[in-house]
Image: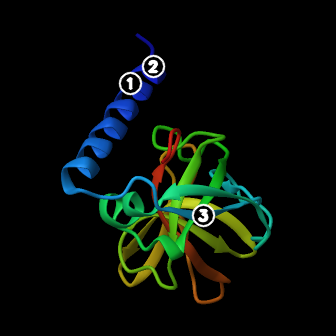
Amino acid sequence: MPVSTKVDALESQVIELERQLMRERGLSETEMVRIPVYTTPLSAGRGNMQPSDYVVSYKDIIHDWLKYIVQIDPARAFIATVMGDSMTHLLVDGDLVLGVHGEEIDRDGVWAVAFNEELFVKHVQRERGRLVLRSENNRYSDIVVTPDDSFYPIGRIIRAVKDIY
C-alpha cells in the first residue's frame, strides 16, 4: 500500500476519533466559525513574496472542534497553502495548513514566518539565544535569524488539513 494511502487512512481515523471525542464530551457539532483562507502561499522552499492580508475565502469550521479538541482560539485561527518541498515528509506542496496567529514565538515548532520580506513555513528553534529556521528536507540549509534581518512570526502551524470540520 502506498505511503499516501496509509497517511490518508490514518487521517480518516484521527478525524473519526476526534468526532467520537466531541460526542463523548457533549460538544456542539453545529456551531460554526468562519476561518480566513489566505491567498499568499507559505513557501516550503526558498521563500515567497511578502505576506498579503488578502483573504481569498473563508471556511466554516466547527467552533468546539477548534477550541476544545485542537485547543486554539477560533478567533486567531487561519488556513494557508504550502508551496514547495522543503518541509517534505511533514508538509507537501499544495497542503492546506491550520495555524493560529501569534505575536511572538513562544515555543519551538512549525511556524509561518515573514523573513526578509519572504514568507516561509519552517521549523523554528531557539539555539544559543537566536532563532534558527529549519527545513525537513536536508537539501535546504538552516537559516539563522540575525538582528539585521526583518523577521516576524505570522503564526504557529497546528496541522495539515485534508478533511476539516
Q: Classify residue 87 as left or right of residue 117.
A: left
Q: Residue at x 71, y 59 (%)?
A: 47
Q: Which residue is at a point 72% across and 76% down the rendered structure image?
A: 116
Residue underneath mark 1: 9
Q: Residue at x 41, y 28 (%)?
A: 7
Viewer-side label of 2, 3:
3
Q: Is residue 147 left or right of residue 57?
A: left
Looking at the image, which is closer to me, 87 or 67? 67
Work out whether mark 2 precedes mark 3 in sequence or the reverse, and give the earlier one: 2
Q: Residues within 10 Å of mark 2 (few under 14, many from 20)?
A: few
Q: What type is the residue that disc 2 sits on?
A: Thr
Q: Check whether the beta carbons of the residues at disc 2 and disc 1 lie within 8 A of each other.
A: yes
Tell me where residue 73 appears, x and y as whole percent: 43, 74
Q: Which of the image's four quarters has the N terminus?
A: top left
The disc placed on residue 71 is none
- Residue type at mark 3 is Ile
> Would residue 138 be seen by someone viewing this image from the given angle?
no
The image shows residue 86 at horizontal and vertical percentages of 58, 46
C-alpha gap between disc 3 and disc 1: 26 Å
Give the residue number, with chain letter if any, for mark 2.
5
Say which label, 3 or 1, has the lower sequence index: 1
Q: Secondary structure at mark 3?
A: strand
- Labels 3, 1: front one: 3
**x then y, percent, for residue 157:** 48, 61
**69 vs 112, nearest the viewer:** 69
The residue labelled by disc 3 is 35
- In the visual, does 57 lie left or right of 130? right
